[in-house]
Image: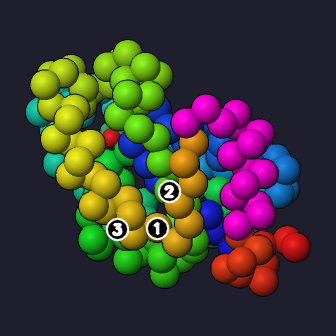
Amino acid sequence: MNIFLIGFMGSGKSSVGKKLSKEMNYNFIDTDNFIEKQTNRKIEDFFDKGEEKIFRKKEKEFLQNFNSENTIISTGGGMACSAKNITLMKKKGVIVYLFITLKEAIKRTHFNRPLLKNRGNIDSLFKKRLHFYKNANIIISIDKKTVEDVSRRIKALLCYITPEGGC
Ligand code: S3P
């Protein structure tokens, strides 16, 4: 089984993914790190040079080529914001959405992300994205929860949707 963690910037996909992969003895991939290594470029560099489209293409290619098993994949906040990417993730695993409120996302990111340089963006970006994120198989609200709480919750909920959930 593969588990794709999706959600807005600051929702803790990487910390939860690392924790969960250790507990479940799964592999862990962070797609931002993967793309940075693959292209030898920083994510910021794509955005600074106005090449978000190329970055999104790399995200899609990652999903198209992904064929591992027993892996937790922490995705960049925009990866799930494409119907095609959602279909690919569902075909290859289970999607878990870490829901964070906008207020909490701002608190955690301090606008410190390439896409948030223009602060005025964040409201409409957040709203637009909810529409995609809600396609997940599992949705967990993470405000005020620790990484441990969230990973415990994910494991419990996986039991309901897959026999491989380890229950
Ligand atoms: C993005 C989120 C970032 C990174 C890139 C674009 C987005 O990852 O992929 O800056 O579109 O929401 P995090 O969600 O890990 O911050």
Disc 3 crowd rating (10 Å Cα; few below 14, some 14-19, many 20+) is some
Q: Position of residue 82 (x, y in %)?
A: 26, 64
Residue 145 vs 78, above or below: the answer is above
Q: Earlier in the sequence, mark 2 or mark 1?
A: 2
Picture residue at 39% right of the left edge, 64% below the top: 134
In this rendering, position of residue 124 left or right of residue 81: left
Q: Magenta residues, as a range?
A: 143-157
Residue to which mark 2 is pinned? 97
Q: Secondary structure at mark 3?
A: helix
Residue at the image position 78 percent from the left and 83 percent from the top: 163
Measured as percent of width and height from the top left, residue 43 is found at 34, 32
Residue 106 in view of the camera: yes
Q: Considering the numbered disc 1 on the image, is that residue within a helix, a strand or a loop?
A: loop
Tell whether 161 sits left or right of 47. Answer: right
Q: Residue at x 60, y 49 (%)?
A: 29
Residue 31 horizontal/vertical position (percent)? 48, 47
Residue 26 in the image: state x and y as whole percent. Answer: 77, 58
